[in-house]
């Protein structure tokens, strides 16, 4: 979706970009995927590309810099993202 959203909530202090875009999607009766083209929990929101930030900034009328500050690697610079290790590569297939 590339049009400006009719309802554009303000981003809160200490709110990550995915949570903010989820609020925008919900307020406009959209899914997160319809708004952004990707899942909310995708790794892309840790460090979004400039094109993703520009698209979100246009839709929400928020500055690119403000959205960049809300990216996980910027907002939580001291944190190290970790992935859970389930021991299974695919659902229903036992680990070897």
Image (cartoon, rainbow, N blue to C red):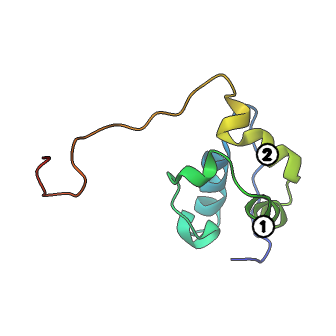
Q: Earlier in the sequence, mark 1 or mark 2?
A: 1
Residue at image coords 22%, 41%: 87
Specify the quadrant of the image occupied by residue 1: bottom right
Q: Nearer the viewer, residue 74 or 19?
A: 74
Percent coordinates x, y for residue 40 in the rendering:
53, 55
Q: Say few, some or many: other residues with alpha carbon within 10 Å of mark 1 (under 14 / 14 to 19 / 20 or more).
A: some
Q: Secondary structure at mark 2?
A: helix
In the image, is residue 89 above or below residue 52?
A: above
Q: Nearer the viewer, residue 92 or 10?
A: 92
**In this rendering, does residue 36 appear at all?**
yes
Residue at image coords 54%, 50%: 43
Q: Residue furthest front?
A: 96
Q: Secondary structure at mark 1?
A: helix
Residue at image coords 62%, 44%: 46
**In this rendering, does residue 31 appear at all?**
no
Specify the quadrant of the image occupied by residue 84: top left
Q: Which residue is mark 1?
A: 55
Percent coordinates x, y for residue 24 in the rendering:
67, 58
Percent coordinates x, y for residue 53 in the rendering:
77, 58
Query: Residue 68, which numbered label?
Result: 2
Percent coordinates x, y for residue 77 in the rendering:
69, 27
Q: How many marks?
A: 2
Q: Nearer the viewer, residue 36 or 30?
A: 36
Residue 93 horizontal side relative to residue 65, left or right: left
In the image, is residue 37 above or below residue 39?
A: below
């Amino acid at each position: 979706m590339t049009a400006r959203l009719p309802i554009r909530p303000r981003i809160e202090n200490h709110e990550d970009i995915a949570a903010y875009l989820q609020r925008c999607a919900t307020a406009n009766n959209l899914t997160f995927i319809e708004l952004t083209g990707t899942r909310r929990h995708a790794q892309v929101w840790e460090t979004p590309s400039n094109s993703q930030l520009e698209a979100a900034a246009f839709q929400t009328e928020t500055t690119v810099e403000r959205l960049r500050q809300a990216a996980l690697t910027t907002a939580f610079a001291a944190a190290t993202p970790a992935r859970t290790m389930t021991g299974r590569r695919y659902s229903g297939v036992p680990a070897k």
